[in-house]
Each structure stands twice: as C-alpha cells, then as structure tokens.
Amino acid sequence: MNFQGLLVLFIVALIFCSVGFYKFVYFMSVGYGLAVAAIGVALLVFGFNDYSTMGIVLGSVLMIVYGFRLAGFLMYRELKNGAYKKVLADASTGTTTLSFPIKVLMWGGMALLYVLQTSPLFFRLDNMVNDNTFIYAGCAISALGIVIETLADIQKSNQKKVRSDMVATKGLYSVVRCPNYLGEILFWTGVFVEGITAYANILQFIFSFVGYILILYVMVDSAKRLEIKQNKNYGSKDEYWEYANNTPILFAFIPLYHLSKVED
C-alpha cells in the first residue's frame, strides 16, 4: 500500500481542518468540508499528466464541489443566522476548557477519518485501474447526494423564513426528516462504490470500508441527536408529532421513524 501517498493526504487534511483550533466544532464542520475539498485537489495533482481514467477526474471534482459547498454553506449560515450562532455556541460549551493535547488528538483523529473516507478514489488512482461501471456509478450516486444536500439546505432555509416555530416539512422533508444527512450518506456511498474492483489487497479494502462505516455511524448518530433536539423544541405541538410519526427519519420508504428511542 502506498503509505507515502496516504501520508500526503493526511497532511493535507491536517492543514485544512486545523481551523478547529479557532473553534473546536470546526474540526467536524468547516474543517471537514475544507479538508475533503483539499484532498480532491490533491488527487487531481497526483494524477496530473498520468490519468488512466476520466472517472478519477470526475470523482475528484465532485469531492472539491462537495467540500467547498459544505464549508461555504456552514460559514454563510454562521454569519447570517443568529439562531445557528446560538447552536454553535451551545455545541462549543465546555470545549474551551479542553486541554491542548485533547484538541491535538481530535485534530489528528478527524484528519485520519477524512483520509479513510476519501481513500477509495485514492486507491483507484494509485493502482491505475481503468474506467468501469463502478467509477461512473459511484460518481452518479455522489452527485445525487450533493444535489439532495443542496436542495435540502435551500428548502429548509426557505421554510424557516415562513415558519420559524416548526421544523421543515415540505419538499424533500416530506419524504424524509433528515434529507441533508441522507444526501451525505449517498455522497460517501458513491465514493465507496468508486473504489470497488480497484483494491490491490484486502488491507486497502478494509481501510476504505472502515471510513465508510464510520461516516455512516456519524450520520445516523447526528440524525438521532437532531431528533432529540427537535423533540425538545417542538414536542408540545401535535402537528410536529403527526409529521414525525409518519415521515421516515433518514431513509426514504423505510418505515424507521424514530432513532431517539434506540439505545446507544
């Protein structure tokens, strides 16, 4: 396995998610988007004048689009949305007293996670695997994920302007209650699919699979925590429970309505 190449990606991720030292939550938000976008750029640089497939280019560009869209949206929301500033402040409660070594561990851990998540495309490039169905299928799934995330953010923002006292319930939110997290899952599912048939050995597959499973866990846990928060904020409204009890929380057409009742 090309550990030197993976080390370069790790250093890239470290550099761009270091914004977490400014605000701890940035390790997992703005720094996350910036690190993924930077890794996408690094993959393009790695393959400069040596691309075996156009699929690598497409997959790398999708990472760049995904990362910059996410980081840009989060920064815009923080600057323009007073309620979101309060959410960030609440999320940061207690983190200002964290010791520097703990922050360094978090920094390194998140950077490693981002390398794991993006590694399927790296292995396809490093192993010089030619185009096949999986690279384009993966790119299509990732592109769909970006579209869903973008639409979900826009729809939620528009609905909140009309009714700030209720969760978004229209558009994509009429299909699932957390379409932004669904889009995130689809994006990384696509990246994982891009690596199928590209692994040179079982170690490469395990490396990528661990990253995929970890991000799935993070998204499901995020949906669970969001539901707990919404139950607290809107639980006194009958219309909220009518919506929550009849709209799947994360996966469309799968009748899983509540994660808050699932034990950790």
Image: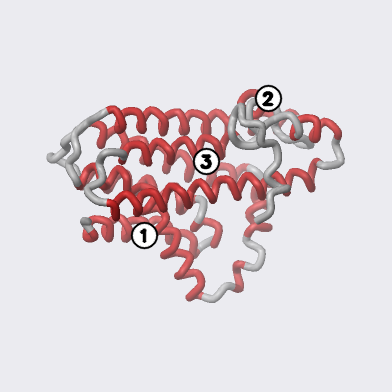
Distance between mark 1 and mark 2 Cα atoms: 39 Å
Labelled pair 1, 3 in contact (Cβ < 8 Å): no
Using the image, determine if residue 237 lies above or below residue 211.
Answer: above
Residue found at x 21% / y 56%? 2
- Local SS, label 1: helix
Is 7 on the left-hand or right-hand side of 51? right
In this picture, is 60 found above or below 84? above
Q: As shown in the figure, which amino acid type bears the numbered disc 1?
A: Ile
Query: Which residue is label 3 attached to?
Result: 73
Of callouts 1 and 2, which one flags the residue occurring earlier in the amino acid sequence? 1
- Pointer 3 local density, CA inside 10 Å: few below 14, some 14–19, many at least 20: some
Residue 135 in which image quadrant: top left
Residue 15 circle label: 1
Task: Give the quarter of the figure containing the N terminus.
Answer: bottom left
- Measuring 13% from the left and 39% from the top, which residue is drawn there? 49
**10 or 71: nearer the eye?**
10
Residue 170's tag is: 2
Q: Amino acid at mark 2?
A: Lys
As drawn, is 251 to the left or to the right of 66? right
Q: How is the image coloured?
A: secondary structure
Are circles 2 and 3 on residues that touch, CB within 8 Å?
Answer: no
Which residue, as the protein is rendered here, is positioned at the far left?
49
Instruction: Answer with mark 2 or mark 3, whichever residue precedes in sequence.
Output: 3
